[in-house]
Image (cartoon, grey):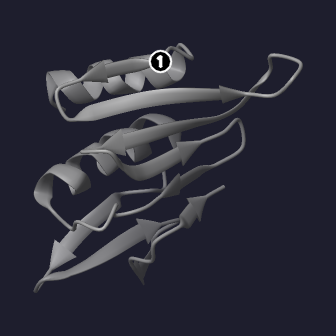
Amino acid sequence: MRKIERQMCDAIANEQDWCKDNTEVINFYNDDKQLVVTSVYLHGNLISEVTNNAVTIFDGGWRTNTTKSRLNAIINRFCDAFTDGVYQHKGEWFITDDKYVKQFVNGYTFA
């Protein structure tokens, strides 16, 4: 895992807003100041939403190695052990979740 991805994941885990280079973490709270969702952006594009119960991933409109690397850092840190994350085969993106391979879909949620 890259240093920037470790810092990104630490910011998510510590409920801290954080920004470095092309990656940003923003926390959103309700009126009672309870965390609702943590959003992660790459080049200003939403790539992940993390809540207490789930991780939702997006490609942000760009299926790049950097996007895939950021998503996998989040998945590896915040999802269960049966998730291998996002990978590419013959130009197509796939997700391995709960030992099943699925075609990547924007808004896929690991619960």
Locate the N terminus and report the quarter of the image it occupies. top left
The residue type indicated by label 1 comes to Asp
**Residue at 21% in and 68% down:** 63
Describe residue 30's horizontal placement relative to residue 98 as left or right.
right
Q: Nearer the viewer, residue 49 or 99?
A: 49
Picture coordinates of residue 39, whole percent (x, y): 51, 39
Picture coordinates of residue 103, whole percent (x, y): 39, 83
- The reply to whether residue 80 is visible in this rendering is no
Name the residue beneath numbered marker 1: 17
Task: Judge whether 54 appears above or below 60 on screen.
Answer: above
Picture coordinates of residue 47, whole percent (x, y): 39, 52
**Residue at 16% in and 21% down:** 3
Query: What is the count of numbered marks?
Result: 1
Q: Nearer the viewer, residue 52 or 27?
A: 27
Task: Judge whether 64 appears above or below 22 on screen.
Answer: below
Picture coordinates of residue 58, whole percent (x, y): 42, 62
Mark 1: few/some/many CA within 10 Å (<14, 14-19, 20+): some
Locate the C terminus and report the quarter of the image it occupies. bottom right
